Image (cartoon, rainbow, N blue to C red):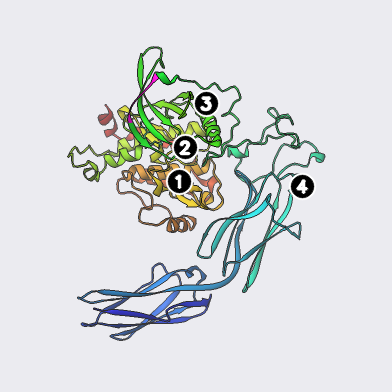
Amino acid sequence: MPTSSISPSSVTLMEGSDITLECRTSGTPSPDVNWDLGNLVTSYQQYNLNQHYTTLKMINVSSNDTGKTILCIAENIVGENESSVILVVHFPPKITFLGQAVLDHHWCIPFSARGNPKPKLIWFYEGAVLNETDFIWTSIHIAFDSEHHGCLQLDSPTHLNNGQYTLLAKNEYGTDERTVSAHFMPDPLLGTSSVISNDDDSASPLHHVSNGSNTPSSSEMGSDAVIIGMTKIPVIENPQYFRSTNNMLKSDTFVQHIKRHNIVLKRELGEGAFGKVFLAECYNLCPDQDKILVAVKALKEASENARKDFHREAELLTNLQHEHIVKFYGVCVEGDPLIMVFEYMMHGDLNKFLRAHGPDAVLMADGQNNRLAELTPSQMLHIAQQIAAGMMYLASQHFVHRDLATRNCLVGENLLVKIGDFGMSRDVYSTDYYRVGGHTMLPIRWMPPESIMYRKFTTESDVWSLGVVLWEIFTYGKQPWYQLSNNEVIECITQGRVLQRPRNSPKEVYDLMLGCWQREPHMRLNIKEIHSLLQNLAKASPVYLDILG
Ligand code: AMP
């Protein structure tokens, strides 16, 4: 058996220095020796000094290589053996980004900082050290290797918090600082300006600024709110969404109530984090039919908060009506469990449907040998175009979905596709989500860099996810970046890599995906453009009519 041994066995060095690693091997016959350097950025020279001794000289070591593993692999006909060393590269801090304040569930001044050892972060407000409190605090959202992305979070800042914010990053090798000017609220004494000076995301519902006509009275805002000429945005945490409710949660929303005795359960369809989903018959729902098939979702947990979320969700769903949004019939709240009633989509969720109609379907057919026909590109376009139509509607309602993915779309008869889930499909697809800080589950594989790094969700981040949905459709439901771990995915996306063209995707469709994956949100295609491009492609596809005809 071959053996392999690297020395030194651990390496900590300063950025810019050189190092030579030695690898000694043994074995009969003499093994072939290979270095596996992964995606090392630093340049190197390799010397094979004799059959059992090779060296690797790394020159001007890059800080980007910190945390990377180097392997020395010895292999002969008997077998293989490897030894490894992890590079730890120290370097002074660098603040690579300090952005304009953005409003998510809290105000956030987003930043990215690098440095090893991990830099200490200190904030200054108007030149004086800012003491962090329960209302202003630093939160690191994503940290891998030596990169830290996060926010200075501010809970309900007022005009008194407007001003210059400086971030200082410091470790034993040096310091770096950057300053940004933040403007949260107009000063009430300076007139009635209704504009929050903000960055480029005025399209975000969470940034909706009223023109005065729907300015709330101060009593609506709570007695101590001093807000002039703008709306304080009510947001719902549920638990993944924070939605603008301007036109969603009208106070007069009438949620249909359905009597429990009108619902007859037939069988279980699936289970989400929210609770179980059943196929049921519902009596006396439509005037022209005695009973119809429906899908009912039963709320698993009945805590006070869960009940509140349930009622808000029901109001929201009542106000979302479109041919490509799953139809919401109403609720049943007599006793437990709380139930939501939706139209039944006979082919279930789109991800399962794509897999069942793809090349791997035989493996999934449970030995029943009832292989389904593979989807054609024109059918894929037809599916994509319907989701784009649903998303165009959501955008027109200033609704940011935040979790668009094929697992959250449903398929009915005749390849009818609707956006069908607003945050209830956690459990079955739990590997699609990345857990941060214990509770929050993020669908990182569908998220653009700004959502991963700063939790910024907008209509433009939904467009990015729509690009990923296109990729899912054209790969018959593969998981995006299936070959990578969650941490690797975060690294890839934040470094600007995008998914490869699926084998079945025409060039025009991949160009469309690339248009959704522009790093700068404002450079991405807008949802209307995407919808009309998909419509044109679907029309131009000659087999399209044959198949649906
Ligand atoms: P969810 O909790 O919404 O993710 O639902 C769990 C599973 O139940 C989904 O993956 C679907 O397979 C199924 N399901 C949910 N809603 C419907 C519906 N309206 N019609 C048919 N099946 C559904």
Tag of residue 319: 3
**Does 304 appear above or below 81?**
above
Sequence-earlier tag: 1 or 2: 1
Element class at badge 3? helix
Q: Amino acid at mark 1?
A: Gly
- Tell me which numbered mark, 3 or 1, is placed earlier along the sequence: 3
Q: Which residue is mark 4?
A: 160
> Residue farthest to the right?
189
Residue tagged by mark 1?
515
Q: Which badge, 4 or 3, is on the more N-terminal residue?
A: 4
The quarter of the picture showing ligand 1: top left
Are the residues at dot 4 and dot 3 in contact (C-beta closer than 8 Å)? no
Is 488 a magenta residue? no
Where's residue 276, x and y in %? 39, 34
Placement of 433 over or under 325, stated as above or below: below
Residue 344 point in image, percent of width and height: 36, 27
Number of residues whose C-alpha sits closer than 10 Å to that of mark 2, classed few (under 14), some (14–19) or many (20 or more): few
Q: Are marks 1 and 2 in contact (CB under 8 Å)?
A: yes
Give left or right: position of 279 versus 171.
Answer: left
Q: Residue at x 43, y 59 (%)?
A: 488
Q: Are discs 3 and 1 less than 8 Å apart at CB?
A: no
Quick one: label 3, few (<14), some, or many (20+) residues within 10 Å? some
In what element is the residue under mark 4? helix
Query: Distance of mark 4 from mark 2, alpha carbons?
Result: 42 Å
